[in-house]
Image (cartoon, coloured by chain):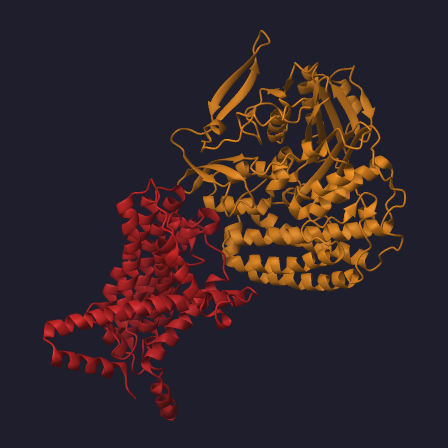
């Protein structure tokens, strides 16, 4: 790939690349589109993360761009508005599809107006919410947004606004309806057995055929990123586990890594190895649940119970060593909370052969079942290009042939010294997404096997961890591979006990955005199953 | 040994001796009706418990084990609970149809149940078109389901009802044709005669190839008619929450639940009657087996019927808890492109078989 300096100087000679953790480009809003198009042309086809910012004197947006060709390449683009009054930034949602939801989120929380965005509804909050809660001057007075005590319709959700700038520089809002009046719209969720959480899907049906899926987020939004701004770093750790509760340990690991990187703490080898074992066990547990839920959504409850049965063994290992089962709370800044339980090694060693045997059983029971195959084959194809454009990472992205495993791209916690394969498939169908999870369980077992046999003996926690953790001023970004895809932590610190801004790159939000392209012209029974094959977790998308 | 037939005859002579004929007949009808209703409910309780226990074993669980020893009173407790539950009235339903639907569903199932022969002389209705009656009256259930889905005024129930309508009407064809195949062999539509024709050997042994094909097709189609997995699309809980009975509560839901479980029993019962000799004991047609035959014949006939039926119910549970659910297009494809042609050819094969042998 071309050097970034070459790419951007063809846009504007005044643009400079700042060498930070990743090459960073600061650009004015009016040149953003041109730069974005050039970057996309030159291989930066993934918008990994989009962070809205309130710098107090102005607002800004930070784009983290990655590439499917050069996996290690990552570039950061920063756009700032001129002052707090001017809020307009051009949209990039036609260049990278994943920007669609990300920009809606930034609009919802900061009020940044993305010009020409096709669907600028608020993403998490109600359409009639007063104020933008992530602004530093937000007034949280409950009188401004009283809790409604009577039933209200979702009509406001169906009015899709788009902002345009006319010749005089004035902003015009145009509206269009989400569904035609004649469409048969079914609400799936927010309380529905198959949405794996409180997700609300508005599905337009033609008989059993799906015309359109419109996800409606925010039912479990807790404002975790905003809460982080008023908590100390060790306190934030507890919140990270509550994002994607099925990969809680991995999320917590990511935040620990980010803080450790900022403070320059060297984590002992033993702590790293145990962290990786915990991560991989979490991944297995999550994949087992994902597998089970997918089978259950196809009507095979027995398979679900089998998955839960084997997941229980992992939960027991967590409970023995970490104390918690779902929210283990074991990773702390600088290492681990305590030394592993004396039983830990034996438990893990006993689990590996058991799991290998069970995977064979799963294949006989379910994978090779003709009904199951008939249900999964030939539906819900996701091409590599769409996956990259939507930013769909993790097993779903890899099933489409996009090699996006952060453990290989940017190894952390000693993953570069472990021998394992990144499982890749090419078709991108529902059956591939099903198989890739079972294959990844085998790879995770391989990783655990290598580590558990020779755990280093150099202590479970770094010695030089300050009692009060204050991150030096600056920006820090850490990517890890959680069970659903790339999980990113962005911390902007002003040198205080609490961060100035924290943004979590959620893999699940992009997964949900893939529902609509995947489900069009499929049957309603497949919507449920395709959803299950994406394996999203709603608290991760809502945060 | 006193058989049920003798008891019934004694009661009949005693009643007609003491009372005028019309009064005796009325009392007999009431006794039979109450007896059937009781059997219907008890069987449902047994089936529900059985299913819960068996599926728990399939899934490495224990199942209900708190109410009574081994949880055998669990279904009784559930029944009391469901009777005490509030029936929620919904504002925007079509009230008359909404309430008629569940009676239609249960009436269809109950009327079919009445036509089964549970043992030697244990038959309530026995007339010359018994098989035809069973096929006809069991279709009443689909009307109930369609009405329930429509009158609930809910999008999920409507989709569930439409699926159910398509599914039941399609699968009734194969089920009907495979029973007709056996009627061809029996040469009668009368259930008593069909059973009597199997005294020497069950039909499935009399014409092994076509009868076996018909048996398998009937089991698949019958399974689909009961709306149970892998054919449980009308109430696919992951897609349609509960399908056509989403809006029903308390005992109204209980009626559908009861009908569903009893339909499973009825399908197994009809299969046992038509293919496996009904209440006829297993008889081996050979010199050396006379001793065995006598022992087998000593087992009460109602036990034979129940044994065969519960064996088929077990098979149905096994299938239900092993397989994932089909999709609607796959379901209809299976019926119209696979089962239907096979059963039609099989009907011809059976005709040829009867001509040759």
Measured from the top left, where is residue A462 in percent x and y? 87, 46
Write the residue at 67% across / 42% down: A485
Tell me if A196 is positioned left or right of B138 in this view. Answer: right
Chain A takes which shade in the image?
Answer: orange
Measured from the top left, where is residue A136 in percent x and y? 69, 23
Q: As displayed, is residue B1 above or below residue B143?
A: below
Tell me if A188 is positioned left or right of B139 in this view. Answer: right
Measured from the top left, where is residue A196 in percent x and y? 56, 46
Q: Which residue is at the front of the view, B296 or A59?
A: A59
Q: Which chain is red?
A: B
Tell me if B257 is positioned left or right of A285 in this view. Answer: left
Q: Which residue is at the front of the view, A290 or A394?
A: A290
Q: Choose top left, top right, bottom left or bottom right for residue B59.
A: bottom right
Measured from the top left, where is residue A171 in percent x and y? 57, 13
Q: Choose top left, top right, bottom left or bottom right for residue A320.
A: bottom right
Q: Quadrant of the C terminus of chain A?
A: top right
Q: In which quarter of the image is the N terminus of chain A?
A: top right
In this rendering, does residue A352 appear at all?
yes
Q: Which residue is at the front of the view, A409 or B51?
A: B51
């Amino acid at each position: 790939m071309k050097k970034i300096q070459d790419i951007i100087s063809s846009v504007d000679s005044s643009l400079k690349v700042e060498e930070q953790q990743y090459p960073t480009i600061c650009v004015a809003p009016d040149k953003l589109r041109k730069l974005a198009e050039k970057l996309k042309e030159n291989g930066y086809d993934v918008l990994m993360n989009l962070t809205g910012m309130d710098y107090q004197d102005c607002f800004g947006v930070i784009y983290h761009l990655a590439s499917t060709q050069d996996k290690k390449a990552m570039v950061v683009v920063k756009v700032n508005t001129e002052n707090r009054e001017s809020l307009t930034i051009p949209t990039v949602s036609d260049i990278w599809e994943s920007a669609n939801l990300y920009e809606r989120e930034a609009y919802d929380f900061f009020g940044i107006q993305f010009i020409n965005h096709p669907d600028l509804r608020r993403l998490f909050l109600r359409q009639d919410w007063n104020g933008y809660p992530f602004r530093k001057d937000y007034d949280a007075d409950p009188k401004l947004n009283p809790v409604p005590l009577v039933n209200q319709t979702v009509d406001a959700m169906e009015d899709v606004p788009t902002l345009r700038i006319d010749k005089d520089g004035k902003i015009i809002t145009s509206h269009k309806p989400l569904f035609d009046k004649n469409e048969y719209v079914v609400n799936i969720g927010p309380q529905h057995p198959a949405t794996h959480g409180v997700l609300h899907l508005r599905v337009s049906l033609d008989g059993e055929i799906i015309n359109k899926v419109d996800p409606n987020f925010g039912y479990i939004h807790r404002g975790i990123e905003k809460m982080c701004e008023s908590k100390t770093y060790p306190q934030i750790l507890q919140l990270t586990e509550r994002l994607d509760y099925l990969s809680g340990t991995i999320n917590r690991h990511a935040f620990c890594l980010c803080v450790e990187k900022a403070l320059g703490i060297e984590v002992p080898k033993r702590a790293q190895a145990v962290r990786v074992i915990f991560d991989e066990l979490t991944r297995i547990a999550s994949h087992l649940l994902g597998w089970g839920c997918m089978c259950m959504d196809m009507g095979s409850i027995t398979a679900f119970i089998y998955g839960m049965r084997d997941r229980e063994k992992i939960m027991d290992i967590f409970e023995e060593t970490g104390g918690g089962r779902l929210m283990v709370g074991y990773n702390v800044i600088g290492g681990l909370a305590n030394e592993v339980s004396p039983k830990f090694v034996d438990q893990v060693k006993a689990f590996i052969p058991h799991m290998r045997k069970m995977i064979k059983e799963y294949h006989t029971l379910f994978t090779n079942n003709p009904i199951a195959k008939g249900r999964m084959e030939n539906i819900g194809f996701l091409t590599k290009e769409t996956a990259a454009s939507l930013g769909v990472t993790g097993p779903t992205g890899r099933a489409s042939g996009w090699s996006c495993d952060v453990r290989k791209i940017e190894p952390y916690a000693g993953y570069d010294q472990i021998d394992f394969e990144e499982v890749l498939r090419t078709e991108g169908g529902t059956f591939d997404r099903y198989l890739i999870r079972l294959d990844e369980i085998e790879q995770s077992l391989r990783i655990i096997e290598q580590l558990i046999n020779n755990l280093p003996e150099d202590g479970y926690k770094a010695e030089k961890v300050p009692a009060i953790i204050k991150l030096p001023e600056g920006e820090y970004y850490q990517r890890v591979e959680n069970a659903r895809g790339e999980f990113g932590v962005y911390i902007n610190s002003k040198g205080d006990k609490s961060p100035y801004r924290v943004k979590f790159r959620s893999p699940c939000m992009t997964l949900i955005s893939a529902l609509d392209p995947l489900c069009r012209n499929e049957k309603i029974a497949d919507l449920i199953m395709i959803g299950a094959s994406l394996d999203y977790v709603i608290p991760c998308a809502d945060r | 040994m006193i058989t049920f037939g003798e008891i019934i005859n004694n009661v009949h002579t005693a009643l007609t001796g003491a009372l005028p004929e019309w009064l005796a007949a009325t009392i007999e009808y009431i006794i039979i009706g109450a007896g059937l209703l009781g059997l219907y409910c008890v069987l449902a309780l047994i089936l529900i418990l059985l299913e819960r226990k068996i599926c728990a074993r399939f899934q490495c669980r224990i199942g209900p084990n708190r109410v009574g020893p081994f949880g055998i009173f669990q279904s009784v407790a559930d029944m009391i609970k469901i009777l005490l539950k509030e029936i929620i009235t919904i504002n925007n339903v079509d009230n008359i149809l909404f309430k008629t639907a569940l009676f239609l569903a249960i009436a269809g199932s109950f009327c079919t149940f009445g036509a089964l022969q549970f043992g030697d002389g244990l038959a309530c209705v026995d007339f010359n078109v018994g098989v035809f009656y069973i096929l006809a009256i069991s279709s009443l259930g689909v009307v109930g389901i369609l009405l329930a889905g429509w009158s609930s005024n809910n999008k999920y129930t409507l989709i569930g009802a439409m699926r159910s309508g398509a599914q039941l009407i399609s699968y009734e064809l194969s089920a009907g044709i495979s029973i007709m195949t056996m009627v061809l062999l029996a040469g009668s539509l009368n259930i008593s005669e069909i059973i009597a024709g199997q005294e020497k050997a069950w039909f499935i042994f009399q014409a092994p190839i076509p009868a076996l094909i018909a048996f398998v097709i009937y089991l698949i189609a019958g399974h689909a008619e009961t709306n149970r997995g892998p054919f449980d699309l009308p109430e696919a809980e992951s897609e349609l929450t509960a399908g056509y009975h989403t809006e029903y509560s308390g005992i109204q839901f209980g009626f559908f639940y009861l009908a569903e479980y009893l339909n499973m029993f009825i399908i197994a019962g009809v299969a046992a009657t038509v293919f496996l000799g009904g209440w006829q004991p297993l008889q081996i047609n050979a010199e050396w087996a006379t001793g065995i035959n006598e022992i087998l014949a000593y087992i009460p006939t109602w036990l034979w019927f129940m044994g065969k039926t519960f064996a088929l119910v077990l098979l149905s549970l096994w299938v239900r808890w092993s397989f994932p659910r089909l999709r609607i297009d796959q379901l209809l494809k299976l019926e119209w492109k696979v089962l239907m042609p096979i059963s039609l050819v099989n009907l011809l094969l059976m005709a040829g078989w009867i001509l040759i042998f």
